[in-house]
Amino acid sequence: MSPVSPETTRVGWIGTGVMGAAMAERLLDAGYSLTVYNRTPAKAEPLTAKGATLADDPRAVAENSDVTITMVGYPHDVRAVVLGEDGVLAGARPHSILVDMTTSAPALAVEIAEAAEKRRVRSLDAPVSGGDVGARNGALSIMCGGDEAAFHALAPLFDVLGKTVVLQGGPGAGQHTKMVNQTLIASNMVGVCEALVYAARAGLDLETVLKSVSGGAAGSWSLSNLAPRMLKRDFAPGFYVEHFLKDLGLALSEADRMNLCLPGLALARQLYNAVAAAGGGRDGTQALVRVVADLAGRPWGE
């Protein structure tokens, strides 16, 4: 397959949430012709104002695209927009490419790949990591599974969106890699929150503490990017708690299927369940610090 390019490739984009909108905007800025769909059309207005065309349904997006990318919320959303009566595969032309960048179930990625192959459509599961910052800056990590030829053809497009792009294997391999990613983040976030609560209780200056620990062996993306938001009590979503809970549930389900015991992951999900139960499901994942602080008997900010 020939590499895609802004001059020759029409791109369809489905899902304009926090990350999806930023990623789609980067493709527009790179010169790609974009057809977009979102269940709430108003959320696509910033893209249409920059030249994107709004479609009535996912099928219409695919009918007008050489590459169709989905970035929605949950596996049931993926199933609806890809496999539904008015879904992507209902309108996709032979030899076009489907890329699902949602964090979803590995088994669903395999099912989609099989359905796409029957229609002579190449497919990739390509979930991402890097949050809203990575989406805006084109610095995402993109974890791919599926068609190797499609992966190489999409290299110029992926380069607009991410800085680390790896083909992990066949269908579902990208989603399994994202489960690894979320497992790493989950326990790390608990550690970040516990460390900040400890520092606060010890009477330390939290900004000064971050200067000391962020660049050493304890450093992490969450510590550098989310801990400063915790200090400012900024809980605006770069990635929703409710979506992270979905991811943790998927990872634990896969772990159960493989007879794995992952107690750190299970603990993180319980703590995030507490965030959601307190009304924080639409907050960013950094809102976990409030629950950890409450458990320590010192509400965050007091």
Image: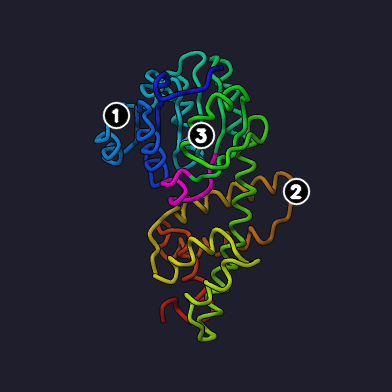
Indicate which disc residue 158 carries: 3
The percent coordinates of residue 161 (x first, y second) are 47, 39
Q: Earlier in the sequence, mark 3 or mark 1?
A: 1
* Label 3: element kind: helix
Please tell me whether residue 247 is drawn above or below residue 264 in the rendered image.
above
Which quadrant does the C terminus fall into?
bottom left
User: Is 255 on the left or on the right of 56, as rendered?
Assistant: right
For this orientation, the residue located farthest to the bottom is: 203
Q: How much space separates mark 2 and mark 3, taking CA atoms?
A: 34 Å
Q: Earlier in the sequence, mark 1 or mark 2?
A: 1
Identify the residue shown where x is 52% and y is 72%: 210
Which mark lies nearer to you, 1 or 2?
Answer: 1
The percent coordinates of residue 121 (x first, y second) are 53, 18
**Foreground residue among 253 and 101:** 101
Label 2 neighbour load within 10 Å: few <14, some 14-19, many 20+: few
- Classify residue 6 by image quadrant: top left
Q: Amino acid at mark 2?
A: Asn
- Classify residue 143 by image quadrant: top right
* Label 1: element kind: strand
The percent coordinates of residue 190 (x first, y second) are 58, 66
Identify the residue shown where x is 38% and y is 65%: 234
Q: Which residue is mark 1?
A: 54
Identify the residue shown where x is 64% and y is 51%: 252
**Foreground residue among 85 and 152:** 152
Please tell me whether residue 279 is drawn above or below residue 165 in the rendered image.
below
Q: Amino acid at mark 1?
A: Leu
Q: Amino acid at mark 3?
A: Phe
User: Is 32 on the left or on the right of 76, as rendered?
Assistant: left
* Label 2: element kind: loop
Segment tinted magenta in the rendering: 127-138
Q: Which residue is mark 2?
A: 259
